[in-house]
Image (cartoon, rainbow, N blue to C red):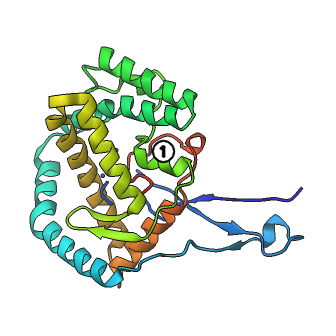
Amino acid sequence: MRLILHRLAGSLLIGVGAGLLGTSSTAATAQNLVDPDEGATGEEYLYEPPQEHDPFESLNRQLYDFNQTFYDYASDPAIRIYGDYVPEGVRSGVANFFGNLREPFSAMNSALAGDWSLSGHYLQRFAVNSTFGLLGVLDVAQEVGIEEREAYKFNELMCAYDIPPGPFIVLPLLGPSNVRSITGRVADVVTSATLTGDFAQIYLPGVYTHDFMNGRKVEKAFTEGALDAYAVVRSAYTQLASACGGPKERGASDGSGMDAP
């Protein structure tokens, strides 16, 4: 029987690797394996990395350098202060609270992708933590065996329907992205604002600030010592985007905050 391996989870990101790459651990990417010969065995498969589509490289590099300057002098010091002076229990509670608020949206998106089991899983976590976990501050669901899973955003929904990521793009301040990810982010914001009303003024800044803080920790760890940090980030982001699988391939969250772009 012909062995066809579409994706192989790797440890390239080490928490990308070690949100935004932005934005709740080790984030895994997949590597594409191709069959070079109709009669080849699985052991003869060759690795073929995804093509890095970067038509805006010149502008992207300028924006990347601009972002790094902002991060070095503004956001990173604030993140260090938060980590050094806010007790771990408080930071964990804040992360749990905003993660719990995401569960209904993850349930909706996974249902739209046709995975009713996963949708029910998100709803179970939301019900348990909202009721017994002080509105989500405590992750009681995890303690009773309802494991945390990565947020299922609109970007993952598009990926489940095989919508391609498009070219690599660096956004001012927000960092690495692509056309699919940008579209998904806009859809998430609009949906959240519509369904939560005035509470969106608290929900959206809280969720995306938490994602950003996690993403910065991941990116710094992943690019430390790199001769060309931009190329490293682009390669990692491109592979992560290409590895984005259907809803049934999504495993438990590893806490990295690095979602498939």
At 38% across and 18% down in the image, what residue appears?
A: 128
At 13% across and 69% down in the image, what residue appears?
A: 70
At 16% across and 55% down in the image, what residue appears?
A: 79
**Between residues 256 and 179, which one lies in front from this camera angle?**
179
| For residue 244, above or below residue 146 | below
Quadrant including the N terminus: bottom right
- Is 131 on the left-hand or right-hand side of 150? left
Where residue 230 appears, as percent x and y from the top left, is 34, 77
Q: Which of the 4 quarters of the picture holds residue 61?
A: bottom left
| For residue 216, above or below residue 133 | below
Where residue 175 appears, as percent x and y from the top left, is 28, 65
Q: Which of the 4 quarters of the picture holds residue 193?
A: top left
**Between residues 36 and 26, which one lies in front from this camera angle?**
36
Where residue 8 appears, as percent x and y from the top left, is 63, 59
At 17% across and 67% down in the image, what residue appears?
A: 71
| For residue 143, above or below residue 67 | above
- Is 133 on the left-hand or right-hand side of 179? left
Q: Is residue 28 visible?
A: yes
**Between residues 25 and 39, which one lies in front from this camera angle?**
39
Quadrant including the C terminus: bottom left
Q: Give the residue at mark 1.
A: 157
- The residue at the far top in this view is 131
| For residue 57, above or below residue 70 | below
**Between residues 261 and 150, which one lies in front from this camera angle?**
261
- Mark 1: few, some, or many residues within 10 Å (few <14, many ≥20)? many
The amino acid beneath tag 1 is Leu
Where residue 20 appears, as percent x and y from the top left, is 30, 57
Q: Secondary structure at mark 1?
A: helix
Q: Is residue 143 visible?
A: no
> How many numbered discs sit on the rendered protein?
1
